[in-house]
Amino acid sequence: FASSATFDPLKAPLSFDNSDDAKVAWAFREACNGQGNTIDMSGKSWTLTKPIETPNLPYLCLNIIWNGYWKNVEYKEKGYWLTVHNLKDSTWRNLGLVTADSGIRIVCDGSSSRNVFDHLRIQGTRVGFSYEAIGNADVSRNTWRDCEWADCERGLVVRGPNALDCFVLGGSAQGCGTGIDFSQGGSNSCVSSFGLSGNATGILVNAGYQLTVSVTSAELNSVLFAVGGDSAGGSGAQGSFRLSVLDCRSTPILGDFKTGGSVQIDALKNSGSINL
């Protein structure tokens, strides 16, 4: 976008309120007045107590830069820190978010696709990153690259019958109730070179969806790979899952596949018993 601009919260013209919340709110407000703008939060670490929600525009291209992989945003209140509507064609990178409640929520009632989330680390939340398609809204071709979810009740959640073609490339889930929750979305998706450690459920998938998973390391997960949710979308009641697991340093339980779906295991090394 030729008219795109960068907004740094540290440069907010707010003589009446010098708080982190006011500076960040100013940057989001200004950036959402156009398309293709960038918010640069890399100048410091931020302690925030007020949630941010973007306007419900039909389309929003918004890039965000943070300053590292560890704690550079701490959110201390309840609910989601950041809610964004109809995000599209955007890149976010280098976030380290710590919060005792929930992290990021992207909501789509139109179209939200071709976004890249690069090196995001979200820790200590009820829901780390929720991507939600309302009704038949199109959410597709979104990529999480080298992202990490730690100590979350649910790490990455994708919801909606048209929430398709998710790519989770690299990264890990550690100490989560559920690392990746595709139980209500995520048809025709790919999880590649992902690590799972100490999760109650590593990856929860929908009974009717197609999914390819490559897990590079897995240890101390109660259930590595399980089916939950309904069978909306995808291929109906017949799910098809292709699973590759390398370097399992604990006893994985792969299943419970009671829906008639098929499971193909390409490689399973250093593991104990398998329950399918």
Image: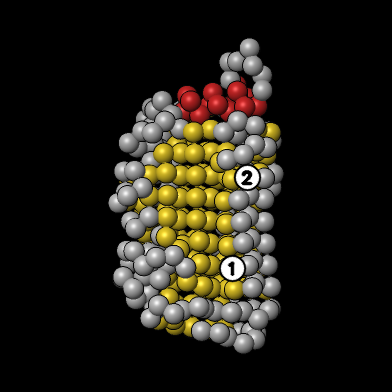
Task: Please name the residue that numbered disc 2 is placed on.
Answer: 101
Q: Amino acid at mark 1?
A: Thr
Quadrant of the rendered image containing residue 21: top right
- Horizontally, is 34 left or right of 6 in the view? left
Residue 46 in view? no
Q: Secondary structure at mark 2?
A: loop
- Where does residue 167 sit, x and y in percent of width and height? 45, 60
Residue drawn where x is 65% and y is 81% of the image: 251
Q: Alpha-carbon distance for marks 1 and 2?
A: 20 Å
CB of mark 1 within 8 Å of CB of mark 2? no
Rendered location of residue 58, percent (x, y)? 32, 36
- Numbered tag placed on residue 201 in the rendering: 1
**Residue ID at (55%, 84%):** 275
Q: Tell me which residue sits at (57%, 85%) in the image.
A: 274
Q: What kind of colouring is applied to the model shown? A: secondary structure
Q: Local crowd at mark 1 within 10 Å, few (<14), some, or many (≥20)?
A: many
Q: Quadrant of residue 162?
A: bottom left
| In the image, residue 151 above or below residue 230 | above
